[in-house]
Image (cartoon, rainbow, N blue to C red):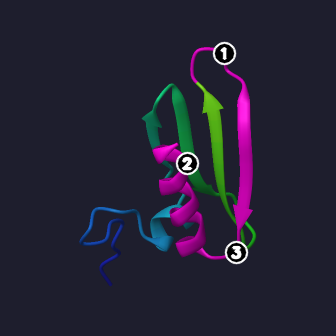
Amino acid sequence: MKYKFKTKAGLLTPYAFHCGYIQEAESNGIKVTLFHEGGPLYHVRGNEINLGKRLFWESFELLTDARAFFSKALKG
């Protein structure tokens, strides 16, 4: 069986997240992280880069919802 870690669009698959892969991006001084940490939830965490201050940490049952929040957080 061939395991896929990325979709055609270049996004991490659910399998990749369950293997411990993390999606990160930075925009406007904010680092946003999308990850899966056991259990049924995907987490989206935002930190201010210069101050190291956590701005938000949201959890979602569906990867699609987590991805939508991740994208929205990057846009500001």
Find the residue positioned furthest to the top: 50
Which of 40 and 69 lies nearest the eye of the viewer?
A: 69
Q: Using the numbered discs, state the Cα–Cα distance from disc 3 to disc 1 in whole angstroms.
A: 30 Å
Mark 2 and mark 3 in contact? Answer it, CB < 8 Å. Answer: no
Foreground disc of the pair 3, 1 = 1
Q: Position of residue 56 (x, y in %)?
A: 72, 43
Image quarter hosting the N terminus: bottom left
Reading the image, the residue beneath label 2 is 73
Say few, some or many: other residues with alpha carbon within 10 Å of mark 1 (under 14 / 14 to 19 / 20 or more).
few
The answer to whether 73 is drawn above or below residue 18 in the figure is above
Which label's residue is closer to the chain start, 3 or 1? 1
The residue pinned by badge 3 equals 61
Count of number-bearing discs: 3
Helix, strand or loop at mark 3: loop
Nearer the observer: mark 2 or 1; the answer is 2
The image quadrant of residue 55 is top right
Q: Quadrant of residue 8?
A: bottom left
Q: Tell me the residue that label 1 is attached to.
A: 51
Name the residue at the bottom extreme: 1
Q: Residue at x 63, y 39 (%)?
A: 46
Residue type at mark 2: give it: Ala
Tell me, yes or no, whether the highlighted magenta stretch contains residue 50: yes
Residue stretch rendered in magenta on the structure = 49-76
Asked whether the residues under the numbered discs 3 and 1 touch, taking CB atoms below 8 Å apart as contact, a structural biologist would say no
Name the amino acid type tagged 3: Glu
Q: Residue at x 62, y 76 (%)?
A: 62
